[in-house]
Amino acid sequence: MSSFRLPEPKPLTLGLAWILLLILAAVLLAASQRPMGWGRYEFNILQPFQGRLRLTPYPALEVERSLFSVGQPAVSVYPLSSGRRGGFVRNLSFLDGELVTLEARILCAGNLTMLEVAEDTVARVTRTIEFPQPEPIRKSGEVTLRGEIVDLKSYLGFREPEFGDLLRSPAAGAIRAGIPPVLLVIDRQRRRTAFLLVARDGTPAGDAVLGRIATRIEVRGELRMWADFPVLAADPSTYRSLWPWE
């Protein structure tokens, strides 16, 4: 009488072992990625806006808040980009500080909003209206923050989230074109805050940050508030790259 035996399991081949190891590494890498918090881009909706045009440190529209409360700014600051290009081709310096109307598409994430402007629609308000006084940029003290640099338009939903080298090239192109750079900071509760980056003298950080995009850095500088928009003023030469274990 013959007895039935289960076939003995064959040892894993070296090739199969490598495949399983790569799959495990991919899962761990995906789990460790820091969420960048990309927002929403209403690319197919052009809406009218009215507010005060400000061209420094970056082009922005101060829009009056519909609900005003004591102790809060009377306006919200919406940075501007011109279509898909970034910076404005049209010279708008004669409208700096003036009340204007324009049409734009919204990009937003959390409490931050950016407007992608149809450049030929920007026009001075000719009728007399009541509007809050220009909002100064207020100093709030020295801080040390850690995060990654990205262009504001990408963070607010213009393109899909990417990391490392996949983020570096498009973000650098956007900043060169005039899109403001921001330092994206994620705290221990996974809350995200984007700080508009300027130099100590308040001028745009601009091309000086290009070598720091998509790498974790530490920035020591002065926290300022432009209405409800946080601004971080520091010389880019003082940014410090972080080691992987920091």
Image (cartoon, rainbow, N blue to C red):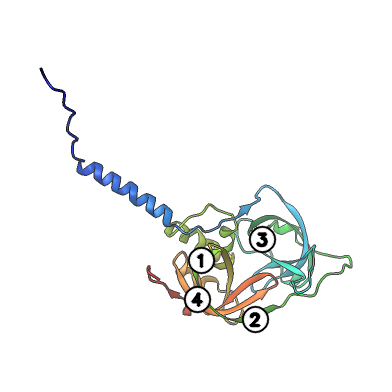
Crowd around label 4: few <14 · some 14–19 · many ≥20 (10 Å): many
> What type is the residue that disc 4 sits on?
Val
Q: Nearer the viewer, mark 3 or mark 1?
A: 1
Say which residue label 1 marks. 188
Q: CA distance from mark 4 to mark 3?
A: 24 Å
Crowd around label 2: few <14 · some 14–19 · many ≥20 (10 Å): some
Say which residue label 4 marks. 219
Q: CA distance from mark 2 to mark 4?
A: 16 Å
Say which residue label 2 marks. 139
Report the side of 231 relative to 67 (left or right). left
Which mark sits nearer the N-terminus, 4 or 3?
3
Marker disc for residue 113? 3
| Quadrant hosting residue 129 | bottom right
Which mark sits nearer the N-terminus, 2 or 4?
2
- Badge 3 marks a residue whose secondary structure is strand
51 or 67: nearer the viewer: 67
Q: Residue at x 80, y 75 (%)?
A: 133
Figure check: 238 above or below 40: below
| Quadrant hosting residue 74 | bottom right
Q: Nearer the viewer, mark 1 or mark 2?
A: 1
Q: CA distance from mark 2 to mark 3?
A: 22 Å
Which mark sits nearer the N-terminus, 1 or 4?
1
Q: Position of residue 111 (x, y in %)?
A: 66, 62
Figure check: 224 above or below 78: below
Q: CA distance from mark 1 to mark 4?
A: 18 Å
- Badge 1 marks a residue whose secondary structure is loop
| Quadrant hosting residue 151 | bottom right
Cβ atoms under marks 2 and 4 closer than 8 Å: no
